[in-house]
Image: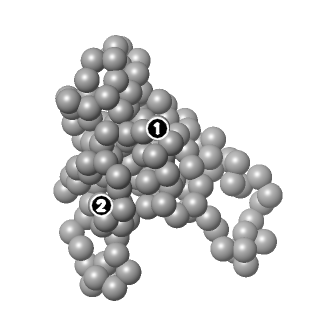
Amino acid sequence: MYARIIVAVDLEHPAQAQALLARATELLDGGGEIRLVHVLENVPGYIAAELPDDLAERRRAEAAVELRAMIDPARDLRIVHDVRRGTPARQILRAAEDSNADLVMIASHKPGLGDYFIGSTASRVIRHAQCSVLVER
């Protein structure tokens, strides 16, 4: 069905991430690629000044370890991980463009009042993606 799938992963919700990955493996064409993407949001400068200098790199390394742990080496699938920094929706869309993805998969929560004013990451990805988007609830 799909040759290149982006799976947007929020490491604070591992069960959702595993469910998305399982679904992606069902939708992947033979010889295709799944790219697990996790985005680390930038820390505001006034907070970053109080944090250790190497915190950003430690966060990136920890996220990479967690993403690698999600990948089952027994499966004969091409699954890679990608840890990015910035605004989640923007970085997910950029990952889709960079890899020429056919599908972006993202989990979404039930919208709250704040989502109607500023929009959720999933809704931003849906509005701006140049490929199909599957939203899992």
Relative image position of residue 91 (x, y in whole percent): 50, 55
Q: Which mark, by number, is residue 99?
A: 1
Query: Between residues 29 and 50, which one lies in front from this camera angle?
Result: 29
Question: Where 25 sits versus 48, above or below?
Answer: above
Relative image position of residue 100 (x, y in whole percent): 42, 39
Query: Between residues 3 and 17, which one lies in front from this camera angle?
Result: 3
Please indicate, yes or no, whether residue 70 appears anywhere in the rendered image: yes
Query: Between residues 51 and 78, which one lies in front from this camera angle?
Result: 78
Taking the image as shown, residue 123 lies to the left or right of residue 84, namely left
Question: Where 90 sits versus 59, above or below?
Answer: below
Taking the image as shown, residue 33 lies to the left or right of residue 80, namely left
Q: Residue drawn at (62%, 50%), measured in percent from left and top?
A: 59
Amino acid type assigned to the residue bearing label 2 in the image: Ile
Amino acid type assigned to the residue bearing label 1 in the image: Ser
Image quadrant where residue 110 sits: bottom left
Taking the image as shown, residue 133 lies to the left or right of residue 97, namely left
Q: Which mark, by number, is residue 52?
A: none
**Residues at marks 1 and 2, CA–CA distance in whole angstroms:** 17 Å
State the SS at label 2: helix
Question: Where 130 sits versus 21, above or below?
Answer: below
Q: Residue drawn at (22%, 36%), measured in percent from left and top?
A: 23
Colour scheme of the rendered structure:
one colour
Identify residue for label 2: 126
